[in-house]
Image (cartoon, rainbow, N blue to C red):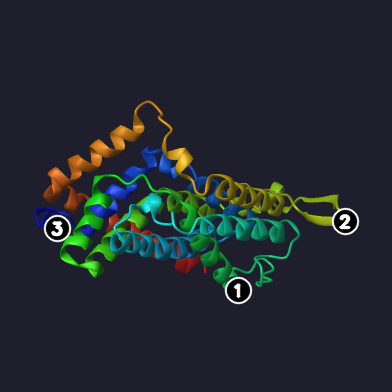
Amino acid sequence: SDFLLNVSFFLAFLAGITSIFSPCILPLLPAYFAITFKEKKRITLATLFFFIGFALMFVLMGLLATLTGKTLSTLFSGVTWLVPAAGVLLLIIGTMIVLGKGFPGFNVHNKIQKDWKGLILAGLLFALGWSACVGPLISGVLLMAATFQNYLTSSLLMLFYALGLFLPLFILSFFYDKYDLGKSKFLSKRVEFTLLTKKINTTYPNLISGILFMILGVVFIIYRGTSIVNGLQFFGLKQNFYDWQNYFIAHSSLFSWVGGVVLVIFLITLYYFVKKKS
């Protein structure tokens, strides 16, 4: 009950931001850059749709883990085919992008208004195989859900945590859109190659984006998720990530205010960019 009283949505958001200092953020980067290279413009909006898919699956996985009494990393231990299946779908997405076909079933022609379903699908699939560094806060949220059956509050806490996790990517998106980096000459260059006797004419961004999705798909198939990355230690950053979360919880009153201010500024900025670029 003490944990429930001390942890706020703002604190969960702030704790999510600290994930930038953990190995968990690394698998997000190729997924983000795959989206960036594919869309080439309105990246803030594209990142938002990708986040929606990711957050939905992340929250659902957390609640399923609680209901089944398992950890996030072992949630799908009984259905070992699920994450590799997501990897196969990521491979298909990558192939379709390289071939200039957009996301499977969505012939988008670089119009994000028609591409949102594919972006959400990519976020869902990525979250399915993404292995979180389950620090003190997420562990406490899941324990709280199991103990108090307060699944709505737990879901919202995990949603805010995921939003904090994505904050660095949104910041990159802001600057990308603000300075119109999508107009770079590189992003309009085309490349031709032959694949199984078929001549392919595509752009360098589509080629890079497709390859990144393919790499993620292969990782999901071979390693059944991104947990292999979580064991990496960079100058003790992972331990610092855990220590900071504990410190936030111990000083929850102060950091709830800090998280609230940061969140308000972020949401206003996000709304401004999405409205301007949509």
Look at 28% across and 65% down and name the residue there: 156
Give the amino acid type for the residue marked by disc 3 in the picture.
Answer: Leu
Q: Secondary structure at mark 3?
A: helix
Q: Confirm whether residue 228 shows in the render.
A: yes
Q: Amino acid at mark 1?
A: Lys
Q: Secondary structure at mark 1?
A: helix
Asked whether the residues under the numbered discs 2 and 1 touch, taking CB atoms below 8 Å apart as contact, a structural biologist would say no
- Residue at 51%, 66% (x, y): give it: 120
Residue occupying the far right of the picture: 197
Residue 76: x %, y % from top left: 43, 57
Per the image, the residue denoted by label 1 is: 114
Identify whether 4 is placed above or below 223: below
Which mark is in front, 3 or 1? 3
Few, some or many residues within 10 Å of mark 3 (<14, 14–19, 20+): some
Of the numbered discs in the image, which one, if any, rests on residue 4? Answer: 3
Give the number of the disc on residue 199. 2
- Point out the tag, 2 or 1, that comes first from the N-terminus: 1
Q: How many marks?
A: 3
Q: Residue at x 62, y 52 (%)?
A: 213
Q: Helix or strand or loop: what does disc 2 sit on?
A: strand
Quadrant of the image occupied by residue 107: bottom right
Number of residues whose C-alpha sits closer than 10 Å to that of mark 2, classed few (under 14), some (14–19) or many (20 or more):
few
- Gap between marks 2 and 3 measured at Cα: 59 Å
Q: Position of residue 70 (x, y in %)?
A: 32, 55
